[in-house]
Amino acid sequence: MSVFGVIQDVINENKFTFYIFFGFFIGFIALRQYLYGTRYTGAARLDNKTVIITGASSGIGKEVAKNLAKRGAKVILACRDLKKTNKVADEIKRQIRDAKIGVKHLDLASFKSVRKFAKDINQNEERLDILINNAGVFYCPGDLRTEDGFEMQFGVNHLGHFLLTNLLLDLLKKSAPSRVVTVSSNAHEKGRIHFDDINSEKKYEPRACYDQSKLANVLFSRELSKRLKGTGVTTYSLHPGVVRTNISKYLRQQHFFSGPIIDLFLVLPLFKDGEQGTSTVIYCAVDESLKKESGNYYRECSETMPGKQALDDGVAKKLWELSEKMVGLT
């Protein structure tokens, strides 16, 4: 009997098991294709443009930096770990001939560092065409606070970028048309802005704090667009997809034994890699069709409706005013 005959006999004897397995396999492939999403293929050039990307030492930020460098932009990698980021810059320069890559220190968990970085940029850069607020942290321990005493996820993901963007607004306006792209997450849909405990001092739930910070990203982008109306500076927030990045390092530390299992059976086969996760970021940063749009939310290279809480203009205004006080702008 041939090998195919043996296989056919096995299938006939175990039809139910075979159909279950086959259905699971097809479902797995379909889910993976869905999660991998859309690839952006636009060819817009960025010659003579300057871009700042936070959190560009790995993951999405690193791959976005490569892509925009290929388009001719001067790309400034704004990161906390200079040693790691300099290696990334060298890698990009080796891969892309004539790449214009700069590295500057920025710790979004420190308002002092944010102010120092912004002062450096304002004094030494003639223009800023695209600011990509990409850096983020996830599932931090409850006792982990920013230098200024704020809950780490809200402090880094929202307050640090809020202060940075505001300090660079004059340069963005001077360089108009320019863009502010903020990487949020579909996690914002479950988020609530807890004004009665925004610093999570009464109760700390890591995931709820992350969801709050991602909702704050979308609200910030929407409110910023209103305040910049008529200036030529446009704003965009987005969900990049489910991506394999270092953002979950604290979660892995807290689940040391289950982490490798999750990586093997969930993260590696299903999640986007850094390059696949860049599409919507790049779309919002460079696509010509969006030049007259502002304040909207995107996923898979398409505008989409954000969660209900993200559409509340009253909450957006209240959060803006509170954030100004928290970062010392008022």
Image: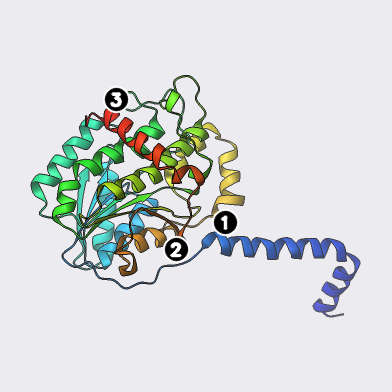
Tally of marks: 3
In front: mark 2 or mark 1?
2
Tell which circle, 1 or 3, labels the residue nearer the N-terminal end. 3
SS state under label 1: helix
> For this rendering, which residue is in front, 66 or 121?
121
200 in relation to 173, above or below? above
Q: State yes or no: discs 2 and 1 in contact (Cβ < 8 Å).
A: no
326 in relation to 74, above or below? above
Q: Position of residue 157 (x, y in %)?
A: 37, 39
Residue at 85 percent across and 69 percent down: it is: 11
SS state under label 2: strand
Circle 3 is placed at which residue position? 148
How far apart, in angstroms, are the residues tagged by discs 1 and 3?
37 Å
Q: As drawn, is 35 to the left or to the right of 163?
A: right
Q: Is residue 106 visible?
A: no
Circle 1 is placed at which residue position? 270
Q: Amino acid at mark 3?
A: Asp
Tell which circle, 3 or 2, labels the residue nearer the N-terminal end. 3
Q: Which residue is the extreme one toward the top?
A: 202
Q: Amino acid at mark 2?
A: Ser
243 in relation to 93, above or below? above
Residue at 47 percent across and 41 percent down: it is: 248
Q: As drawn, is 40 to the left or to the right of 73?
A: right
